[in-house]
Image (cartoon, grey):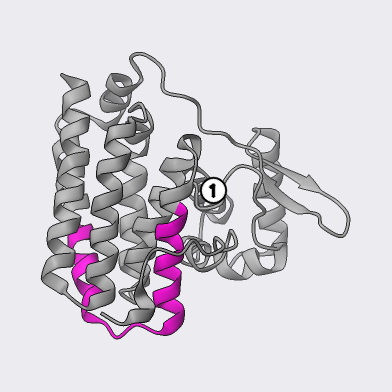
Amino acid sequence: MDPDDTLGARPEPEAAGGLLGSAAFRPVRAGNAFEETVERVLQVIKLGLVAHGERLPSERDLAGRLNVSRDTLREALHSLQRAGYVESRRGRYGGTFVTYRQPAPQPGALRKAVQGLGSGDLEDALTYRLVLETGAAEAAARRTLSDSQRSGLRRHLADLESVPADRYRQSDTRFHLAVAELTGSPSLVASLAEARLRLNDLLDAIPILERNIDHSAVQHRAMAEAILAGDAEAARRATEEHLEATAALLRGFLG
């Protein structure tokens, strides 16, 4: 491994709406521009890619990424503001800021989320995520990464290892999607984001357990180190171990 790839430092976190936002804010299809614009923005907010208090990309930038008119974007953002997900601020440091906060887990929330997922769909969703993420980690490890990509992965890992518990899920999502982005496949990033969103309510319904965070930290670090070292097999193994642990936790809370 390159000596510069040591993972002990705690660099400044990446600005919200940066590389991850660019992948998540993919163009909408023609025909239902308003509805799909709302869907794309909500996906990014609910996944925590742009978290509470953070600013969305500028109106011009966001309209360009989504390939919609600024009128359509404004209408979508106004609707989300009325629903309590964002707010518009004026002035030099103004823009559209996320106001949504993920609610704390409530008794019965996990079973309700499973019911919403659909009968028999939990194992399907877990298997789909496992295949996507292990493949992404392996593919990322096989690529020749730029200095910026390597430092970006270290940055996401450092953030994940230092965030308070109430921001852990969002940081965890950013780390996993950052791995997917290293593959260079926007389609894979989009699929992984959708897979994560499919399980989002389930994951958010699990209490944050300190022992589980400690265990996950070891696994996340193993994933990052393997990718940076170009060890595809180790990256796949570490990712599989981590996802199987998450699946076991879900099954445990379901009883």
Front one among 124 and 169:
169
Front one among 208 and 206:
208
For this view, does 157 lie left or right of residue 219?
Answer: right
Please provide percent x and percent y for residue 138: 18, 70
For this view, does 196 lie left or right of residue 139?
Answer: right
Give me the residue at 23% from left, 60% from top. Answer: 222
Please provide percent x and percent y for residue 184: 34, 77
Depicted 68 relative to depicted 122: above or below: below
Quarter of the image for the N terminus: give it. bottom left
Name the amino acid, label 1: Glu
Give the residues in magenta: 132-159
Q: Can you see residue 128?
A: no
Give me the residue at 22% from left, 69% from top. Answer: 226
For this view, does 236 lie left or right of residue 36?
Answer: left
Give me the residue at 14% from left, 47% from top. Answer: 127
Q: Secondary structure at mark 1?
A: helix
Depicted 202 relative to depicted 136: above or below: above
Please provide percent x and percent y for residue 109: 36, 20
Front one among 214 and 165:
214
Q: Can you see residue 162?
A: yes
Please provide percent x and percent y for residue 126: 18, 43
- The quadrant where residue 185 appears: bottom left
- The quadrant where residue 18 appears: bottom right
Q: Label 1 crowding class (10 Å Cα cut-off): few <14, some 14-19, many 20+?
A: few
Can you identify the residue that label 1 sits on?
35
Depicted 217 relative to depicted 116: above or below: below
Give me the residue at 23% from left, 52% from top. Answer: 219
Residue 95 drawn in magenta: no
Q: How many numbered tags mark residues here?
A: 1
Quarter of the image for the C terminus: give it. top left
Chief secondary structure of the magenta portion: helix
